[in-house]
Image (cartoon, grey):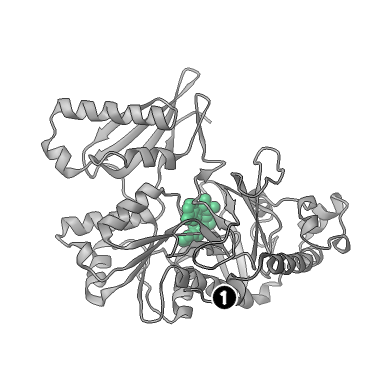
Amino acid sequence: MIRDAARESMQRDDLKRLQGERLVGLVGRIYENVPLYRQRLDEAGIHPADVKGLDDLARLPFTYKRDLRDTYPFGMFAAPLEDIVRIHASSGTTGKPTTVGYTAADIEVWAEMMARAMAGAGVSRGDIVQNAYGYGLFTGGLGAHYGGERLGASVIPISGGNTQKQLMLMQDYGSTVLCATPSFALYIWDVAQSMGIDMAELPLRVGIFGAEPWSDAMRREIEQKLSIKAIDIYGLSEIMGPGVSCECVEAQDGLHVNEDHFLAEIIDPDTGAPLPDGERGELVFTTLTKQGIPLLRYRTSDITRLNVEPCVCGRTFARMDRVSGRSDDMLIIRGVNVFPSQIESVLLMSPEVAPHYQLIVEREGAMDVLGVEVELTPEVFGTADDHALKALGAAIKRNIKDIVGVTATVDLKQPNTIERSEGKAKRVIDKRPK
Ligand code: DLL
């Protein structure tokens, strides 16, 4: 369902005009209120009065994650703290968390964007939304919560973890929608198996999955095991949280970006040059309406492409491909660029293994070596002999070489030996010396 056709289906020329006007307003706002931007724009010799519309975008400076770190915690806020009603942060692997603030108007927009996303995923009033994204500093929990409520659905704020209880409530309350990371959704299925629950028998109909990269093969696996539609949702704390873009249930072919609020560009991650429509590169966002912490040309590090062709659902907003990885978690193994999601797709071609895997990167001499650890399914583990397992390992290794172009060692593990996640899965263990 299209929640706001006047916007989501607007003519692209009208959309560009709206984006241009909003960009002009944004540049004025950040020049006035954020010292870092005033300095950057002054250094670039750009005065807000020079910025007339979208044509000026490529001249404007980028914003990087390190800018948020350098001005930690509130240095990039454009609104006074009295007007900030919520603070979130994304967990950094090192150092201080990236911290963002929202005004009441920002929270309104966020709820509306999430409601749009969920409506597009086929959720409506009357649905029971089990929200297994973590509540807290992470934006997933509260983001999906407010969106579900805005839509008029019944939201169960169970948060992440508590897998057995997730299943109990799913059965007792008759949840029709699950919001979770895709890896947690699969873990819930694992636990259901061990409890003798057939998830296909439950009323669950739709899953809204995101916050980590996942492949189309993993989608098919989840859809089949849980007997649901699995929808990809994307977002990042710096720009808002979940709901920056989301697939529509009609096409499930790219995530519609809420372009009236978020201006998307694709650039060459090495040179920073904008790339033509349809080319793959780094996704960059400008927040067009944010008040708390508006960002200009924020470098997401996420690698994708944008498709502006009309969609069967009737929306005109550009669709981004599922994120294939991050420019900064991309592994380079003996010269080959490898995204964990590519390996995942190859693993899922073999029904003998479960979608639980980890990539181990080590250095031997001057060479980086890639190890792939993947669990066997319980059936195969219980029945296959050594000879069969050897052949399976060799076949997976060959597939990785043929499809991804890299040689990896393949280690077939016993079921339930790879650490499970109740949030974002840790797919890569990098043991290389820093
Ligand atoms: O993960 C927001 C979110 C919550 C999105 C719930 C979807 C659902 P952060 O913790 O700031 O925010 O992490 C943002 O996660 O730059 C991507 O690299 C990755 N990411 C988010 N969604 C997807 C997705 C939330 N659908 C970072 N596919 C982003 C691939 C995703 N990667």
- Secondary structure at badge 1 equals helix
Q: Can residue 383 be seen from the camera position used here?
A: yes
Q: Which residue is mark 1?
A: 5
- 33 to 124, vertically: above or below: above
Q: Quadrant of residue 133?
A: bottom left
Ligand 1 within 8 Å of disc 1? The answer is no
Q: Residue furthest top?
A: 365
Query: Could you tell whether 131 is left or right of 388 in the image?
Result: right
Report crowding for label 1: few under 14, some 14 to 19, many 20 or more residues within 10 A (C-alpha).
few
For the point 22% across and 57% down, the residue is: 191
Q: Position of residue 342 (x, y in %)?
A: 43, 39
Q: Say which residue appears at 42% left-offset and 65% top-offset.
A: 249
> Is residue 85 something one can see in this rendering?
no
Q: Which of 18 and 133 lies nearest the eye of the viewer?
A: 18
Q: What residue is shown at x 43% (from left), y 32% (from top)? A: 404
Residue 157 at x, y = what percent? 38, 73
Q: How many marks?
A: 1
Q: Where residue 180 appears, x then y in whole percent?
A: 38, 61
Tell me the residue at 41%/77% (across/down): 124
* Residue placed most toward the observer, 335 or 79: 335
* Horizontal side of residue 338 vs 328, given as left or right: left
**Residue 245 horizontal/vertical position (percent):** 53, 61
Q: What residue type is disc 1 on?
A: Ala
Image position of 118 (left or right of 32) = left
